Amino acid sequence: MVKISEKKILETIEKALELKKGFLTLDTTRGNEPKWDSLGHISVLSSLDDIFDGRIAGIEEMGTVKSVRKILWILEKNSLV
Amino acid sequence: MKVRIKSIEYYLPPKIENGNSLIKDNPDWCIEDIEKKTGIKTRHISAPGQTVTDMAALASEKLFDSGVDKKSIDSIILVTQSPDYVLPTSSCILQDRLGLTKACVAYDVNLGCSGFIYALAIESALIESHLINRGIIVCSEKYTQYIDKSDRTCRPLFSDGASALLVEPCEDDNIGPFELGTDGSGFGNLIVTVDKTQTAETGMPRNRLYMDGAKVFMFTMDRVPKCANALLDKSGKTFDDIDLFIFHQASKFVLDNIVRRLKLPEEKVFVNYPQVGNTVSASIPIALKDAINEGRVKRGDQIMLVGFGVGYSWGACLVRWQ
């Protein structure tokens, strides 16, 4: 299984939320980024599932995750990064 | 099963809401963003006082106007989660309003977006076992009564409407197999609470639809592909054997992801959610009727129908169109 880099994950989230390039950081959260609302979060989940070839759908806690840092932590915990 | 869908009709309330209606009540909403993600441009809203049974009767009468003999109907299943009363069951009211015989079996199925598939499984099994001969499946929903005007998660999605469909015996195996399932651990993610205790515990508003969009989305992304694959395994067919896929018309982001996960060619997937919205249990029969009207379904075509949602509950089946 090919692991995906942190840079690629940040770019994917950034694109899903339609943010300007380089705008997203590890400290971006659903609380401090207005575009990361409920619809935005669905875009994030969908985009990550796409690059991880369907392995995100089975990780339940991704549905409630609220920050970039936590996303990376969950992906690492599941041996995806 | 040696059963076929003989005819389908539907009723959508004439009142239509679009992006302008939403922005009128919610000036801070970005309609372009909502429409881009949901894909839903217009939704139908029932008239004040119009009930699920009213809509069910209007759809059913269309079926009878098209030549179906009322006296031949010995079963009604009404699929709804927004019944006229807590009791009696709405299908009993419908039996009387339609003037069907007193020998007619009538009962409600309280399921949402998977409800049509369950009703088709039950009705087909009853016909095959000779408990009934000819039945109608009516799906009627008025979810908008549960949704606040300012609910950004639910209001842009849900639409009111009813479908009516006649099922009867035939010589060939046209319906089945079925793949049905349940995961009640997700019950709180799409819910209308009516009990004060439940409300105090969950903090959810009474008599209002609550949906955790992300969790429901995760469920669909995980479960629907598994359900479709399990159905194909059961039937011994492959995706190439299916001429048309009709999924519950949840929204663009849900259907796009199912198509992506299953790697389906878009031309084999029928959608009508942009104009109709999400009519819950009625969405699959309404989409099937629209697909027939648009010439997307030919006699002999193999169609996969997949419903999924509230519960969580899901169901899929194959239908050979006759």
Image (cartoon, coloured by chain):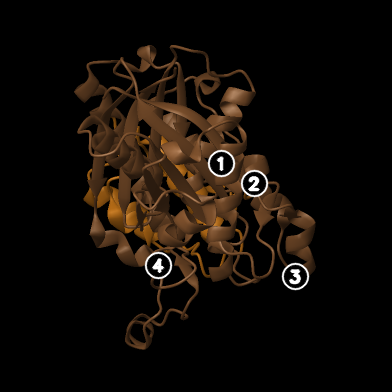
> Measuring 57% from the left and 24% from the top, which residue is drawn there?
B292
Q: Are marks 1 and 3 on the same chain?
A: yes
Task: Tell me the residue that label 1 is attached to.
Answer: B252
In the depicted structure, whether residue B264 falls above or below residue B84:
above
Query: Which mark, residue B191?
Result: 4
Determine the chain carrying the residue at label 1: B
Give the chain ID for the orange colour: A
Earlier residue among tags 1 and 3: 3
Task: Tell me the residue that label 2 is attached to.
Answer: B40
Mark 4, other Cα within 10 Å: few <14 / some 14–19 / many ≥20: some
Mark 2, other Cα within 10 Å: few <14 / some 14–19 / many ≥20: many
Q: Are marks 3 and 4 on the same chain?
A: yes
Determine the chain carrying the residue at label 2: B
Earlier residue among tags 1 and 4: 4
**In the figure, residue B221 lies in which quadrant?**
top left
Earlier residue among tags 2 and 4: 2
- Distance from the alpha carbon under mark 3 to that under mark 4: 24 Å
Name the spot of residue B61 as percent of width and height, x first. 59, 44
